[in-house]
Amino acid sequence: MTERNPDREESRDPLDEEAIWAEIVASYGEEPADDPDRPESESERGVEDLDLDKAIDLEKDSEPAKGGLDQVDRELDRLDRDLDQLDKDLDQVDKGLGKSVLRPDDGSLSFTVYAAGTGPRDWDAAEPSDDDLDESDDGHFVPPDPPLPKADTTAKFAWLAVLGGPLLLVLMTVLQQELTWWAGLLGIGGFIGGFATLVIRMRPGGDEDDELPGGGAVV
């Protein structure tokens, strides 16, 4: 390991920083001088100095890239033509949706578009009938209304006695007539007799209740 020589370090002149900065500022903006030992690049050479074989190789390498760009351009042109044809087809379809009507007077073509469910049609819906029902439609059968019960003569007189007896007593009281024995007998007796007749006829299990119309199925 060599030792440092203090005499050599002391003999070195200190750097003059101000002089260096002044030189840098003075040379700012000037182009540096060309170094004669620096080799020239291919861009600085003349045409006669270029290697012909190397130039041919570079040209061949650039041809595939150029051919690929040309193919991309042709594909784009073909896509543009396909889009134009598609637009024309869509216009023809839109025109075909309307009903064309040729006017005889001026020969112009007009379109009439009918809304869904409206407009003329060449068929009519069939009228529904009972023959259309099958076994699968059994749950949708609506039974007819049951017939009204027919009152017999006994029931009519019973209702007349029940309603007419009290009505007779009320009329004689309102008209301030003398309440005789026969009026009381008809009023009170008729009401009691008619009411008893209706109650007796409501007794279940009678012979007349066996075959009532609309009585339903017998289990």
Image (cartoon, rainbow, N blue to C red):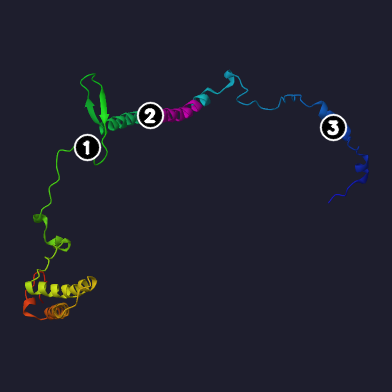
Q: Residue at 92% of width from left, 46% of height from top?
A: 6
State left or right for residue 149 relative to residue 17.
left
Residue bearing mark 2: 80
Image position, residue 115 (x, y; %):
27, 38
Q: Residue at 36% of width from left, 29% of height from top?
A: 78
- Tag 3 secondary structure: helix
Marks 1 and 3, how far apart at CA: 98 Å
Residue 1: which disc? none
Q: Which residues are magenta?
A: 57-79
Q: Quadrant of residue 10?
A: top right
Residue flagged by tag 3: what amino acid is it?
Trp
**Few, some or many residues within 10 Å of mark 3 (<14, 14–19, 20+):** few
- For marks 1 and 2 on the same chain, the one whose residue lies earlier in the sequence: 2
Quadrant of the frame with the C terminus: bottom left
**Few, some or many residues within 10 Å of mark 2 (<14, 14–19, 20+):** few
Residue bearing mark 1: 119
Image position, residue 40 (x, y; %):
65, 25
- For marks 1 and 3 on the same chain, the one whose residue lies earlier in the sequence: 3
Q: Residue at 37% of width from left, 31% of height from top?
A: 79
